[in-house]
């Protein structure tokens, strides 16, 4: 199969599995959205997936992402930043992305707020939470989430949408559930306390069905769509 056939087939398969997991969980069909994680993949592959109907794409590395965003500017895609954020990169992130999933400190939130262009809608923000056994060292500990949420809430040009995590990988559903639970619990606690968060960003190629069963609203899928990444 050539690449586009493969990509189209993978996209259909992921959509089918996602829909089945949503139904299995007794959730509304539109309650989970698919973020296609395109790091290390060329703009041409993103364009193909966009032509097949995919709208939202996630990138981890700003330097790599910017040329792709420029090349695909006419496609009217929704870009999500899901990588570690260095403070000298916030201006371009604030200008070019619609969502940032990996905010884990006030300094970054303040810079994004002040650098978000006035002619754009508020930047959608998720706080990255570091659950124990986390792969990425990013994220703040669960007990610091409420103070950071309050600070973000007070900033202009940002809209706090929810929480994100990237737990250590496991192929076992029980372990996956155990690793995702603390984020779900925290999310529920916040909403019980009056926050109106609508986004739980969790689940990748390896655990998205479990994440959907646990309540994820955005699954971030790379490998199952685009194939293995080089390097
Ligand atoms: C790379 C990445 C993903 C996608 O992982 P896959 O295993 O390729 O689906 C999701 N979330 C984050 C934060 C990532 O860095």
Image (cartoon, helix red, strand yellow):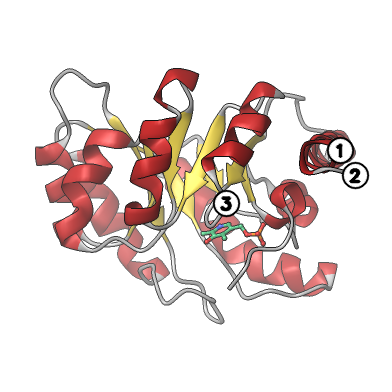
Coordinates of residue 74 in the picture (x, y in percent): 43, 19
User: If you read the primary sequence from the N terminus, does the residue marked by circle 2 or circle 3 appear first?
Assistant: 2
Residue 8 image-quadrant placement:
top right
Give the answer, above or below, for where 169 lies relative to 20: below
Q: Position of residue 151 (x, y in %)?
A: 18, 49
Depth check, front residue: 51 or 189? 51
Which residue is disc 1 drawn over?
Answer: 9
Q: Which residue is the site of mark 2?
A: 1
Q: Which residue is mark 3?
A: 41
As drawn, 59 above or below 173: above
Horizontal and vertical percent for residue 163? 46, 51
- Report how far apart the C-alphas of labels 2 and 1 lie in the structure: 10 Å
Q: Residue at x 49, y 54 (%)?
A: 164
Of badges 2 and 1, the one in the foreground is 2
From the top left corner, tell me how far across and down residue 3 is, in percent: 78, 43
Question: Which residue appears at 59% of the width and 31% of the height?
Answer: 47
Few, some or many residues within 10 Å of mark 1 (<14, 14–19, 20+): some
Instruction: Answer whether labels 2 and 1 touch (C-beta < 8 Å).
Output: yes
Q: Is residue 98 visible?
A: no
């Amino acid at each position: 199969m050539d690449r586009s056939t493969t990509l189209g087939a993978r996209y259909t398969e992921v959509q089918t599995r996602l829909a089945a997991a949503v139904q299995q969980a007794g959730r509304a069909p539109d309650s989970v959205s698919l973020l296609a994680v395109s790091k290390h993949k060329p703009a041409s592959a993103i364009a193909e997936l966009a032509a097949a109907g995919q709208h939202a794409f996630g990138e981890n590395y700003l330097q790599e992402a910017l040329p792709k965003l420029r090349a695909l500017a006419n496609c009217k895609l929704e870009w999500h930043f899901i990588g570690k954020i260095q403070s000298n990169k916030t201006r371009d992130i604030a200008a070019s992305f619609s969502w940032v999933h990996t905010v884990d400190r006030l300094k970054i939130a303040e810079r994004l707020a002040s650098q978000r262009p006035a002619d754009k809608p508020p930047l959608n923000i998720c706080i990255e939470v570091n659950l124990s056994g986390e792969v990425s060292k990013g994220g703040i500990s669960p007990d610091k989430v409420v103070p950071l949420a309050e600070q973000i809430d007070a900033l202009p040009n940002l809209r706090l949408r929810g929480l994100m995590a990237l737990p250590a990988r496991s192929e076992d559903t029980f372990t996956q559930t155990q690793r995702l639970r603390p984020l779900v619990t925290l999310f529920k606690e916040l909403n019980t306390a009056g926050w109106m968060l609508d986004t739980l960003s969790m689940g990748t190629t390896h655990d998205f069905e479990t994440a959907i069963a646990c309540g994820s609203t955005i699954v971030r899928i790379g490998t199952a769509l685009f194939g293995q990444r080089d390097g």
